[in-house]
Amino acid sequence: MNEFFADFPWWWAIWIGVAVFSGAGKKMSHVKKHHRRKAERRRVEARAEAEQRRQATAWEAQRVSDIEALMADHDRVNARWLEYELDVAKLIDYPMMSDVREPLTVDFLRAKRVADALRPGRAAEITTDARLLEYRDAVRAFELAFEIAEREARRIKDQHFSGPERQRLNTARRLLTLAVDEAATGAERQLAYLRARKELDGLLSLPEEAVAALEQRVAPQLAPRAQWPEPLR
């Protein structure tokens, strides 16, 4: 064995050593590159996932914002409708807005029912694009139907009434002004209110909300309902 190593060229030993270390070095380099590529791939995937989460959060925030804006539009139209439902004087000026015999009035009331039924309690309750589009279409239909009905009501005013009926409406309008006039005496206000209701009897179908709001303004001057004249019950 010693003779073998004695006869073995020294430069072969060096070459074998270099080859071994070189191979080990290349393998180590390859392993490091593999780990670097894997780490980079994980970083890219993490950035992609983070961007997806950011986009999803932004989309969700925008969707909620859109729904809240729709709900605000819905509220505005309802508030405009309530101006008629709660104001007898305004209904006298534009009686078509409470007349369910009018097709345009029926149209906007039907559109209101649809929009109200689709309205969520909270914006987050609408979780799909289809549901959002359905609610949006309903609000826009309600908005448009109300605009058309209100425009027509303001155009025709009391033209659908006969001359004597318009005179009764005018009388009721004056009486209601007196009924809510705090400068008038209690007796004057009560009498004015009762006479106004009598003038409107058979002409306008007053919403209960409008009557309640009016009576609240005149309430201190009113006798108990049981004491009202028969035609006003």
Image (cartoon, rainbow, N blue to C red):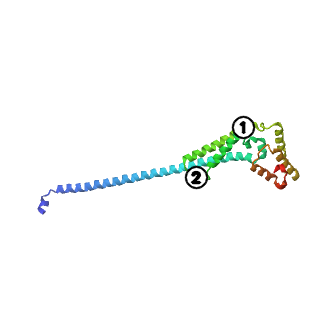
Q: Image quadrant of residue 32?
A: bottom left
Callout 2, which amino acid?
Answer: Glu
Q: Is residue 92 visible?
A: yes
Callout 1, which amino acid?
Answer: Glu
In depth, the one of 148 and 59 nearer the eye is 148
Task: Estimate the x, y position of residue 137 in percent, counting from the top left.
Answer: 60, 43
- Residue visible at 25% across and 54% down in the picture: 23
In depth, the one of 26 and 207 nearer the eye is 207
Alpha-carbon neighbours of circle 2 within 10 Å: few (<14), some, or many (≥20)?
Answer: few
Q: Mark 1 points at which residue?
A: 152
Alpha-carbon neighbours of circle 1 within 10 Å: few (<14), some, or many (≥20)?
Answer: some
- Residue visible at 63% across and 44% down in the picture: 139
Please state if 111 lies on the left or on the right of 219 as rendered. Answer: left
Where disc 1 sits, the SS reads: helix
N-terminal label among 1 and 2: 2
Q: Can residue 183 be seen in this view?
A: no
Residue 75 bears which disc, if any? none
Q: Image quadrant of residue 219?
A: bottom right
Q: Quadrant of the N terminus?
A: bottom left
Task: Estimate the x, y position of residue 58 in percent, counting from the top left.
Answer: 54, 49
- Residue visible at 39% across and 54% down in the picture: 39
Task: Estimate the x, y position of residue 56 in percent, counting from the top left.
Answer: 51, 50
Q: Mark 2 points at which residue?
A: 125
In the displayed image of the protein, which residue is found farthest to the front? 230
Q: How many labels does the image show?
A: 2
Where disc 2 sits, the SS reads: helix
Query: What is the C-alpha distance between the residues marked 1 and 2?
Result: 36 Å
Please state if 196 lies on the left or on the right of 130 as rendered. Answer: right
In depth, the one of 96 and 150 nearer the eye is 96
Task: Estimate the x, y position of residue 7 in percent, counting from the top left.
Answer: 12, 58
In the displayed image of the protein, which residue is found farthest to the left? 3
